[in-house]
Image: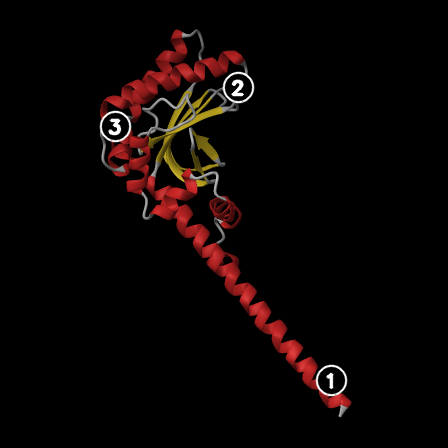
Amino acid sequence: MKNLLNFINFGFFKRFLIVLFLFAIFVFISAVSYANAVSNDLAESVFRLHVIANSDSKEDQDLKYKVRDSILEYINKFAVNCSSKEEVIAIANDNQEELHDIAKKVIEENGYSYNVNIKIGNFEFPTKTYGDISFPAGNYDALRVEIGEASGQNWWCVMFPPLCFVDVTSGVVPDESKETIKDSLNNDEEYSIISDSESPDIKFKFSLIEFFKGIDFAKTSE
């Protein structure tokens, strides 16, 4: 009788472990799916500008900002009133040669002979904060300006929605720009993830996205 009870208890414990294991797998898959869905929605909603300095020297960093200002001044004429990410990307593509020439001119006017590369594509970014808006690490479409060796610190902003064209020195993105971001995302929760840094729940979701982003079950199973 005692052996029978032990066997029943062992069978129950074994079934419990199996259920617990299956539940853990379900939670993991759900977390990965959620993180990738939100990360993809954010990535599909923005187009970034990324300017990389030749080095971390003060002179090269100052040059980076001068190149940035000239690039923004030129592209602002066309992009500030765009209503979609696709419009901004099209403008960047159409003006890629002009952007190269503008950057090269600034470099030469400041006494340097660095090459400059203008690239439009999908690039990996670490977690970045712009004013009081944060974007999780991930791959984003961007206009990348590489100065010289492009081994120095970088500067970035969001060309669409048009955050590059607002003053965030105060550390706060204007409400109008926030509304543009909010409208370009799929739901209020996605917007709260990048804009609400106080809520513990939102902090957890942001961390969840950073931790699980990019896991592809199709690739890991190959």
Pointers 2 and 3 in contact (C-beta within 8 Å):
no
Q: How many marks?
A: 3
Separation of marks 2 and 3 at Cα, in angstroms:
29 Å
Q: Residue furthest right?
A: 2
Q: Secondary structure at mark 2?
A: loop
Q: Name the residue nearer the viewer: 216 or 173.
A: 173
Residues packed near mark 1 inside 10 Å, few (<14), some (14 to 19) or many (20 plus): few
Residues packed near mark 2 inside 10 Å, few (<14), some (14 to 19) or many (20 plus): some
Residue occupied by mark 2: 55
| Left or right side of 83 for 203 | right
**Numbered mark located on residue 6 in the image:** 1
Q: Secondary structure at mark 1?
A: helix
Which badge, 3 or 1, comes first in the chain's sequence? 1
Which badge, 1 or 2, comes first in the chain's sequence? 1
Q: Residue at x 32, y 37 (%)?
A: 181
Q: Name the residue nearer the viewer: 205 or 199.
A: 199
Horizontal and vertical percent position of residue 211: 53, 47
